[in-house]
Amino acid sequence: MANWVLHSLIDGIRTEPGPDAQHLPAGASPGRPVSQRLNTTVAAQMAALCPSGALAVNEDAVAVNFAHCIHCQRCRQPSGALQWRDDAQWSQWRDSAANPLPRRYRHSVNVRYLDAGACGACMGEVRQIDAPPYNLHRYGIFITATPRDADVLLVAGPVTEAMRLPLRKTYEAMPEPKRVVTMGVCAINGGVFGQSFASIGGVGEVVPVDLVIAGCPPPPLAIVHGLLLAAGQLQGLQDGEDARP
Ligand code: SF4
Ligand code: SF4
């Protein structure tokens, strides 16, 4: 332990500010595109450039649908024309009926993570959330191995046929009240994998979803943001932004 502290002091490892900060840590993620006003011709060019149909042109403005943005960065300045925002507030309730866990859970939430068929990048991001730089535990949120102890089910990836039953069983094994949070566009609607003989598509095809975290993949602080939202500690995407299926 003493060596770890010494190593941290020498190398400058420290816990980053929370996801309510205005900026992501340097080098962690370029952030996300924002809806904005653009010259009509340029807006149409950006929409044509987008490989996933995430950009919609409305006269002299372009709107980003985060449910389809795969973060290819083609639209990002300077090669593209869109400004990006480097915050971590990428989450949104699935519909107006969804709400956080009851207040008594606010500082004691157990999360069961399930990979339902992800490419591996979502897994790479979620593995960092309880490491020292992001320090999930400071919020009273913990990863648990068993669904019997879980209050939140965090799911990544499109749901493969092989994972349909494990996902359903995991959900059913969790006690009430429970919330389902999805991370990444694949878990919203199948993402780049879509629907096929092997992929069912989004998590909502199998279990009811409460909250979606956009991104491909979402960076660790955006995942923490979604979990804090489920715990009732933060607000979601701003008015006019959309990450719903
Ligand atoms: S970053 Fe997202 S919105 Fe921009 S071009 Fe790629 S998929 Fe489309
Ligand atoms: S959302 Fe992106 S990073 Fe996550 S599983 Fe799908 S393709 Fe991979």
Image (spheres, rainbow, N blue to C red):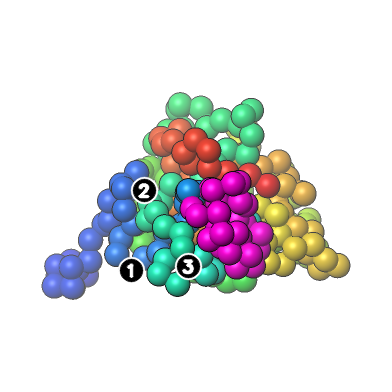
Whichever of callouts 1 and 2 sits on the residue coming sooner in the sequence is: 2
Number of other residues with Cα within 10 Å of mark 1, as a class: few under 14, some 14 to 19, many 20 or more: few
SS class, disc 1: loop
The image position of residue 194, as x and y in percent, is 75, 63
Circles 1 and 2: CB distance less than 8 Å? no
Q: Quick one: which residue is furthest to the right in this view?
A: 197
Q: Check disc 1 and report the residue beneath it.
A: 27
Q: Amino acid at mark 2?
A: Pro
Q: Check disc 3 and report the residue beneath it.
A: 80
Q: Quadrant of residue 104?
A: top left
SS class, disc 3: loop
The nearer-to-camera label among 3 and 1 is 3
Q: Out of 137 and 70, give the one closest to the viewer.
A: 70
Number of other residues with Cα within 10 Å of mark 2, as a class: few under 14, some 14 to 19, many 20 or more: many
Q: Quadrant of residue 152?
A: top right
SS class, disc 2: loop
136 left or right, relative to 57: left
| The residue at label 3 has a CB less than 8 Å from ligand 1 | yes
Circles 2 and 3: CB distance less than 8 Å? no
Whichever of callouts 3 and 1 sits on the residue coming sooner in the sequence is: 1
Does the segment drawn in magenta span residue 166?
A: no
The image position of residue 29, as x and y in percent, is 40, 64
Estimate the spatial distance between the alpha carbons at disc 1 and disc 2, rounded to whole Å. Answer: 15 Å
Q: Amino acid at mark 3?
A: Gly
Q: Which residues are magenta?
A: 38-62
Q: Check disc 2 and report the residue beneath it.
A: 19
The image position of residue 123, as x and y in percent, is 54, 66
